[in-house]
Image (cartoon, rainbow, N blue to C red):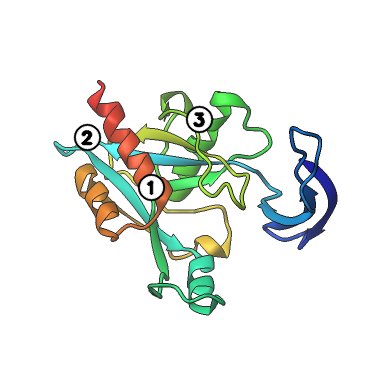
Amino acid sequence: MELLREERVGEGGFLTIHRTEVRNRRADGSSSPPYACDYLVRPMGLDAVAVAVFTRARGRVEVLLRDGLRLALVLGRSAGPVPVPDRGPYLLFTEVVAGVIEAGDRGEDGVRRRAALEVAEEAGYAVEADRVVLLGAGLFPVPGMLPEKVWFAAAEVEQPEKQAPLDGDGSPMEEGAVTRWVGLDEAIADCVAGRIEDMKTELALRRLRDWMAAG
């Protein structure tokens, strides 16, 4: 691929659009016609970690789900230019704990550290970074427009009743979030039934179940 032109749109915001013109270099030496390709970059950090917070304290495996604001769904699905099959209100959206991997979070230890920090901020539980379990390799959720890779982790809470306030990161976007404990199998069934619609959440929960089954 040959990059012919690039401009950045919306710098200074949460996301930056990279608007490019490229062409393909073929094996026979020929080139494709130039074509446009846009992708989005999050300046504060490219990748993210999704954390399946779980407990075995009440005689079964339960996972913590978080209902919080997702303005892209509130605004984008109600006002998009192309009709969508459903236009739910999506005011509060159900997910596992997740957060952006920042510049200082290097390697697997950095992913564990970021996971532990996000559990404290978004779930109200203190977990040690060295007790965070990584659940396999990271995946690209939307490779056609985002270079973000999501990493998967799990963190066990031994005393679920000892939950601190959900401080979040101080952003108004995290106001009003609530958490709840749900049985692991029930949560996965909710994903299949469409009651939970977040892809990374279903993957994190399924990987947690596989990890626990492996012993």
- In contact (CB < 8 Å): disc 2 and disc 3: no
- Residue 196 is left or right of residue 107, and the answer is left
**Front label number (2 vs 1):** 1
- Find residue 177 and report its image quarter: bottom left
- Percent of width and height locating residue 25: 77, 39
Residue located at (82% from left, 45% from top): 3
The three-letter code of the residue at mark 3 reads Arg
The disc at residue 112 is 3
SS of the residue at dot 1? helix
Question: Between 53 and 204, which is closer to the camera in this rendering?
Answer: 204
Residue at position x 59%, y 41% in the image:
47
The residue lying at 75 percent from left, 43 percent from top is 24
Badge 1 amino acid = Thr
Instruction: Choose top left, top right, bottom left or bottom right for residue 133.
Output: top left
Task: Using the image, determine if residue 179 lies above or below residue 111.
Answer: below
Residue under label 1, please give it. Answer: 201
> Mark 2 and 1 residues: CB-CB less than 8 Å, in contact?
no
Quadrant including the C terminus? top left
Judged left or right of residue 200, residue 101 is right
How far apart, in angstroms, are the residues tagged by discs 2 and 1? 19 Å
Image spot of residue 62 (x, y percent):
24, 42
